[in-house]
Amino acid sequence: MQSSQRAREIKPFYAMTFGDRAAAMERQGVHVVKLCLGEPDFGAPPAVRAAMAAAMDGRPLGYTSAAGLSALRHEIANFYRDRHDVIVEPSRIVVTSGASAALLLAVAATIDPGSEVVLAEPSYPCNRQLVESFGGVVISVATTASTRFQLTKSLVEGAWTPDTRAVMMASPSNPTGTSIPHDEMARICEVARDRGAWRIVDEIYLNLTDHDDRRAAPRSVLSIDPDAIVINSFSKYFGMTGWRLGWCVVPEVLAPETEKLAMNYFLCASTPAQHAALACFTEESLALCEERRLELLARRALVLEELARMGLAVPAIPDGAFYVYVDVDGTGLNSWDFCERVLQEAHVALTPGKDFGSQSGHRFVRLSYTASRDELREGLARLRVFVSGLR
């Protein structure tokens, strides 16, 4: 017997690989500073934890609708209205088992074998794997610091073919933490829409984007393209990574098909996690999440300052999420060897750029600043000694 070709050919997610190796070292008594995973150290807000405890009091916890708990879908819709000044009907929202499941549903609902999907390189590696799992063809567009490692209208037009079925974007991006300017996003969406292609936009880190000079919250792509497919999650802004809860917003025409896919693939997202997530939208929880966003800004400043001191370049300064994409080419090591050695020799876990693309991934590593400030200082001190030793 033999496994499927899909299973044999799929690539690992190296961030998780390095995270597992760091955890194995810690089990042996080694203190590893883990800067490899996008996992906020805050945890869920207290009100959410209390709501989960209440939900687990022995009451029956049956399946919800495949599209999610009605009350939660309404709260998400209200969040778009109040935070982003966008009206989204709850019927367009599908609650999922993390954003990964939302991405899977978006691809399953739009991509047929042979369909081409345009996405930036570097980008989140699982997107490529999902597209290829459904027989789609990834058109990976090399980007540079000049476009902040993001797609532009001209790059999308240059990659277009008669088989292009969708454009996938992430703003802010994993691994770079950079956003697509809103005007440029509008131009990209217009090109794709006019040519009959779907726009799939990852907004997982949207609420961790820097606010503007008027302290206004970032705008969702839905404010310029109401029929875009949007992916979001409770993992990042709400600190609920292990709870595995996310959502997608789909056009009305896709809502019935997406719900059918959801019921076949997952039945529904975790019932107690959905009930607990209702407490994310209390005034208390939202205020706490904003405090945490500002704390991440302070951590970013600390990281950028220390990286500059040790001579490691960050070609595109992030404006959201909690990642820094660091150029290690000047150290004499490629990114994989850099991550291997810094883990073994300095006990700092980073993610090699190989995860995010082949064209320039050999020279970049991703650093996640989700650890506490004390842990960040320790990790950066170790990194400084390691880099100094290379030179």
Image (cartoon, rainbow, N blue to C red):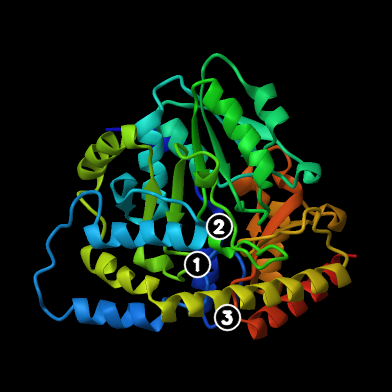
Q: Is residue 4 visible?
A: no
The residues tagged by marks 1 and 2 sit, at their Cα atoms, a distance apart of: 8 Å
As displayed, is residue 305 above or below residue 231?
Answer: below
Q: Is residue 355 left or right of residue 391?
A: left
- Which element is circle 2 on? helix
Kindly indicate the quadrant of the structure image that contains residue 277: bottom left
| Residue 73: quadrant of the picture | bottom left
Image point (61%, 81%), residue name: 372
Q: Residue furthest top?
A: 162
Question: Marks 3/2: CA distance?
Answer: 35 Å
Q: Residues within 10 Å of mark 1 (few under 14, many from 20)?
A: many
Residue bearing the label numbered 3:
30
At mark 1, the secondary structure is loop
Q: CA distance from mark 1 to mark 3?
A: 30 Å
Residue 249 position, x and y percent, is 39, 46
Tag 2 residue: 206
Mark 3 or mark 2, whichever is nearer to me:
2
Q: Residue 281: image x %, image y %?
A: 38, 71
Vertical side of 20 occupied by 382: above or below: below
Q: Given contact means CB atoms under 8 Å apart, are the residues at marks 1 and 2 in contact?
A: yes
Residue 6, percent from left and from top: 39, 33
The amino acid pointed to by label 3 is Val
Nearer to us in this view, 84 or 356: 84
Q: Position of residue 88 (x, y in %)?
A: 39, 49
Q: Amino acid at mark 2?
A: Leu
Mark closer to the chain start, 1 or 2: 2
Picture quarter containing residue 76?
bottom left
Quarter placement of the N terminus: top left
Three-letter amino acid code of the residue under disc 1:
Tyr
Name the residue that disc number 1 marks. 237
Q: Nearer the viewer, mark 1 or mark 3?
A: 1
Crowding near pointer 2: few (<14 within 10 Å), some, many (20+)? many
